Every structure is written in structure tokens, then in C-alpha cells.
Amino acid sequence: MTEFIMIHGGQPKTPGFCDRSGWYYGVQFGYKSYAPCKMLDYVQGDWQTYLQALQSTGATQAVVADFRERDEYKVIHKRMVDVAAIGVTPIVVAKFHGSLRLIPEYVIGIKSRVGLSVPTGHMNDGFLPDIAEFKAFSSARRDLHFLGGHPDQWLYLKKYYADVADTVSIDGNTMYRHAFQYGKMWSRNGYYHEFRGQCKSTNAMTIASMRNAVRYFERGWLHTSNKKPSKRVINCQQQLGLIGIQKTFI
């Protein structure tokens, strides 16, 4: 069963959204937490303070770092050990081709997760290794965690990696952002409905979106318009080298 987590610290209403939608609550390190957390997301800050925050919030999984360069391996491995030593599942976000080879599957008996940054369409945004890398650099099925993105992208990527990895957790706050900024709600059938100007409660739309995202994902049917994938899914296909410029790895 895939776990859904809304990473949205600093917003006191978010734990309630999660409770009412079946999602877990998470916080980016440095933001105030309004409830016990399932996950902490590390971007920057004092590492020892981060470890203390993991223990005080009760988080069971945590981002260790974005793995951008090969020479970061020793630091990242040390952080994986630090996190696993307190019983928390480490997530390392792969950011370059070949990084899977350097992310150990187990650390102190705890299975790590490979974090994949889902592209949202911005230049140089996101990173997705292709299946060949998993086959070349992993001796067993890996556990995946998706960071950001939209439900149709999550479902597409789950299906794409199904032969080599298990999608065990997903985080994002797009449900909240689309409701409050654009007046949109995700449909269980796989697309956004716009309710701008119809006096719909943005809180209710957020909760409905979160519930529908789970239903859609578990249903496993990738909605397409006129038999064409959404631009969001196309972004994933471009990152994977399935269309456009073919990516390589060493």
C-alpha cells in the first residue's frame, strides 16, 4: 500500500486536511510542525538539529539529501547511518545518472528509499533515472518515494517502474495549492475540475482532491484526453528519455 504524505509545514490546517483525507502529515525541516509527523524533508540546516527534530516529531521516514555529485557519497552515507540508527527510514533523492549504484539498499538493517523528484515542467526541474539504471545498479527491487508532482504522474511512474521497484510513499502539496490558488480540485477519474467563482470552499476542495488522488491512484487507470497523455506525463517521458533527447548514464 502506497503512503501519501502532505509536506506542508507552517500551515495549522494541514493536519486536519490529512486526518480527513487518509493522508499522512509531513513538514520541511525549519518550518513549524502542528502535529506529529510521518516524514521530515531536509533541504538545509544544522544536521544534528535535524536528527533531534526527527525524534521530537516522531517521524518514521526522512529525506537525507539530494544526491547531486559523486563526491557527496561519504557525507550522504554517514547521514543515512545517522537516520537509520534512530529507527527512521532514510530517503536519498537521486539527482544524477549512476547515483543508484551509490545508494545502499539497506543501512543498519533498515531498507532505504530512493527519492525521485517528479518534474513539473520548469527548466531543469526533476530527475528520473530510467529502468536500465535500476537493472544495472540494483541487485533487488528498490523502494521508491516520489517527491512533488501530480496524481497522473505518480500513477504513470508507478507503472513505469513496476518491474524493478515498489512505489511505497509519495509526498506533495499540489492538492492544497491548486485549490487555494486556482480553484481546482482533482477528479478521481484523473483530471482537474475548476470551480473558480462558484463559491466552493477551498478547504473542502483540498480534502476532496486528496481523497480523489488516492482513489485514482489505487484504481490504476491512467486517464488520457483524446488518447494523448497529459503535458505532466509528457514531462516525465521527456525526463526518462522516452521522447525527445535520449538520456545516457555512466
Image (spheres, rainbow, N blue to C red):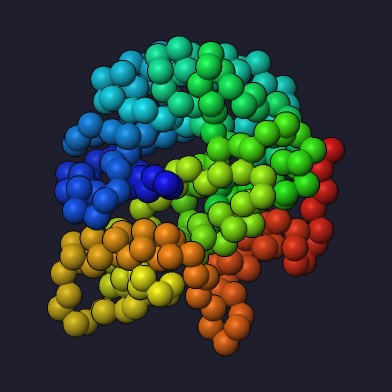
Pick the residue in front: 216 or 192: 216
Number of marks: 0
Horizontal side of 200 relative to 216 (left or right) equals left
Horizontal side of 172 relative to 202 (left or right) equals right
Of all residues, the one furthest to the bottom in this rendering is 226
- Whether 184 is drawn above or below 84: the answer is below
Residue 224 is situated, as x and y percent measured from the top left of the image, at 54, 78
Q: Quadrant of the C terminus?
A: top right
Residue 106 is situated, as x and y percent measured from the top left of the image, at 58, 22
Q: Residue at x 26, y 51 (%)?
A: 22
Q: Residue at x 24, y 41 (%)?
A: 10
Residue 101 is situated, as x and y percent measured from the top left of the image, at 73, 30
- Residue 196 picture quarter: bottom left
Horizontal side of 126 relative to 20 (left or right) equals right
Pick the residue in front: 224 or 192: 224
Residue 155 is situated, as x and y percent measured from the top left of the image, at 51, 60
- Whether 139 is drawn above or below 81: the answer is below
Q: Residue at x 32, y 39 (%)?
A: 26
The answer to whether any part of residue 33 appears in the image is yes
Q: Residue at x 36, y 63 (%)?
A: 215
The answer to whether any part of residue 122 appears in the image is no
